[in-house]
Image (spheres, rainbow, N blue to C red):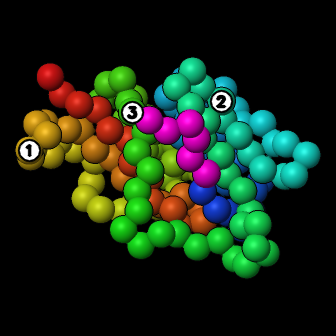
Amino acid sequence: MFSHIMVGANDIEESKVFYDAVLGAMGYEPGVIDEKGRCFYFTKSGIFAVSKPIDGEPASNGNGSTIGFSARDIATADAWHAAGLANGGTTCEEVPGVREGALGKLYLAYLRDPAGNKICALHKIS
C-alpha cells in the first residue's frame, strides 16, 4: 500500500545514528544521505526516510501518529527497542510485551526517536 514513509527531524545525523541502530537490529542496511541532506532506508517493500521539514520550520511529531516496523520475532523487536534506547530514543507507551485485541496477539515495543516521532516494532504472534 505504501511506497514510502518520511518523518521530520531537526538533526539528520543524530536521527541517522538512531535509525541505523534500530533498523540495523532488524537486519536493514544503514541509511543513505542524499544531496539534499535527507536520509533514506531502501527495502524490498518500501522506503523509510528522515528529512528536515521543507518549510524551514522545526520538525514536530504528529499527535496520535505511529510508524510501525514489522519484526520477524520477539527477539528482533526487543533488540530493536534496546538499540533505540542506546542511541538516543526514549521508551513510551507500555513496556514491550504482548497485547491482545481484535487483531489477535501482538508483541509491541514503542519508542520515540530523537525528534519525538513515535515508532513501534510489531510482531504478530500466530
Q: Residue furthest front?
A: 1
Query: Where residue 97 appears, x then y in whole percent?
Result: 22, 44
Which secondary structure, mark 1?
A: loop
Q: Is residue 2 magenta?
A: yes
Viewer-proximal residue among 17 and 50:
50
Q: Residue beneath label 3, please?
A: 70
Q: Quadrant of residue 111?
A: bottom left
Residue, x 74% and y 45% (percent of image)?
39
Q: Residue beneath label 2, please?
A: 42
Residue, x 36% and y 53% (percent of image)?
110
Among numbered discs 1 and 3, the one appearing first in the sequence: 3
Query: Where residue 69 appears, x then y in whole percent?
Result: 43, 39
**Which tag is nearer the camera, tag 1 or tag 3?**
1
Which secondary structure, mark 3?
A: strand
Query: Where residue 96 appears, x then y in whole percent?
Result: 28, 47
Which secondary structure, mark 2?
A: strand
Residue, x 60% and y 66% (percent of image)?
115
Is 11 above or below relative to 110?
A: below
Name the amino acid, label 1: Ala
Query: Where residue 20 appears, x then y in whole percent?
Result: 65, 39
Numbered tag placed on residue 102 in the rendering: 1
Name the amino acid, label 3: Ser
Disc 1 vs disc 2: Cβ atoms closer than 8 Å?
no
Magenta region, residue range: 1-6
Quarter of the image that includes the N terminus:
top left
Disc 1 vs disc 3: Cβ atoms closer than 8 Å?
no
Whether residue 17 is visible here, answered yes or no, is no
Name the amino acid, label 2: Phe
Disc 3 vs disc 2: Cβ atoms closer than 8 Å?
no
